[in-house]
Each structure stands twice: as C-alpha cells, then as structure tokens.
Amino acid sequence: MKKRNFIIVMIILLALSFVLIGCNSTRQIDRYYKRLVKADSATIIIDMQVPIFGKISMTMKMDDNKQYTSVPEEYKEVIGDTTFTYTKNDNGDWIKTESQTEEDEVSIKEKFKELLNSKNYEYSKDLKKFVLKDDVNPEFLDGMQADSLTLEIDGDKCIISGEVVNSEGMVMEISITIKDLNKTEILLPTVT
C-alpha cells in the first residue's frame, strides 16, 4: 500500500514539474500566437503614455469579416472583394462607404506577428515573465519599434508592456492586452 501511494505521489510530482516547465518555455508564446491566428474574433487594447498628449487608449476588435478601431472610430466589413467602411460624418451620423479590398491590406493579427515571435523573448525567473532579448527590436503597428518589453500569458489573455519608439523617435510607455479570443462580437452601426 505504501509503495502504491509513493508511486502515485511521484507521478503527480512529475506531472506538476512538466506543467511548471511548460509555463517558462517560449513555446507558450508560439501556442498563443497560433490560437490568435485561428481565432474567429479577439479584442486588443492598447494604452500608450505619449509625451505632450498624455495617456491614449485604443481598442481594436476583430470578428470574422468585421473590424473595429476606436481611434479613429471606424468599422470595416469585408464581403468578397469589397470593403465597407463605417465612419461618422460631421453631424455625428454613421455613413457607409464602399471600396475594393486591397490585396496588401494587413490583418490586425499580422500587425502583432513580430511582437508574438517566441524567438524574440527569453524567460526571466525574477520577473516571472518573458522579456524581449537585448538585441531584438521588432517593428509593429506601422512604424513602432519595441525597445524593452515584457510578455505574460494567462489563459486567453496576453499582456505585453514596456517601452516603444515611434517613427519620429519618441519613446513611449505602452501596454497591449490581447484577450477575448473567440468571444469578441462586433455589431455594425446603423447607417442613417
């Protein structure tokens, strides 16, 4: 009986050690990015501390063939080769415009590909987070370059925070939260 209990305890400890090792592996970043790419929907919240302007928050959502950005506030819906864009006019009413979908248009998921590249990170036991390697400065969001970042994954949520440099050379504090994979829903505005 004691031998059987000892074996059960050893199996549990071995399983627990594999779980803990997996939490520190950069493969966790690869798995999260694959889940993001396969997700039908997601929400991305970006908070930046911009010199002169102060704190700026932006929300980006994607839901199948629809996208939403809060700055500037805009919805997009892609049907076949046509993109419908919803924006507010000067009176505050929603209007809908139609254009051809551009082949080189980058999806929201692709804009964060380099930030979620596991080869760019190493695990810090002190911080208990992934840290951007010293010699790596990935570019994302049309010209922003990561300077120093940490990345942590908790279930369906990924939080990236640190400093970035914009195309004008300004250093900014940033926090990016990717969440609600396959739970985000976009309702298009009513056009008047």
Image (cartoon, rainbow, N blue to C red):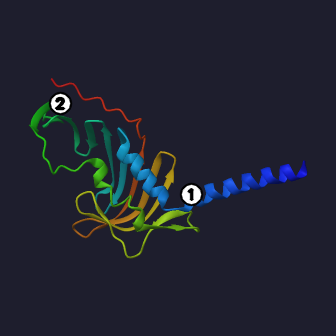
Location of residue 181 with respect to 141 vertically, above or below: above
Left or right of 117 in this view: 72: left
Residue 13 or 71: which is nearer the viewer? 13
Q: What element does badge 1 sit on?
A: helix
User: Residue 170 bears which disc, if any?
Assistant: none
**Residue at image x 70%, y 57%?**
14
Crowdedness near tag 1: few (<14), some (14–19) or many (≥20) residues, C-alpha within 10 Å: some
Which quadrant of the view contains residue 113? Answer: bottom left
Whichever of callouts 1 and 2 sits on the residue coming sooner in the sequence is: 1
User: Residue 94 bears which disc, if any?
Assistant: 2
Q: Percent from the top left, x then y, of residue 95?
A: 14, 31
Amino acid, disc 1: Cys
Amino acid, disc 2: Trp
Residue 19 or 121: which is nearer the viewer? 19
Which quarter of the figure is the C terminus placed in? top left
> Closer to the observer: label 1 or label 2?
1
State how far apart marks 1 and 2 are (Cα): 45 Å
Q: Is residue 112 visible?
A: yes
Quickly name the residue at label 1. Answer: 23
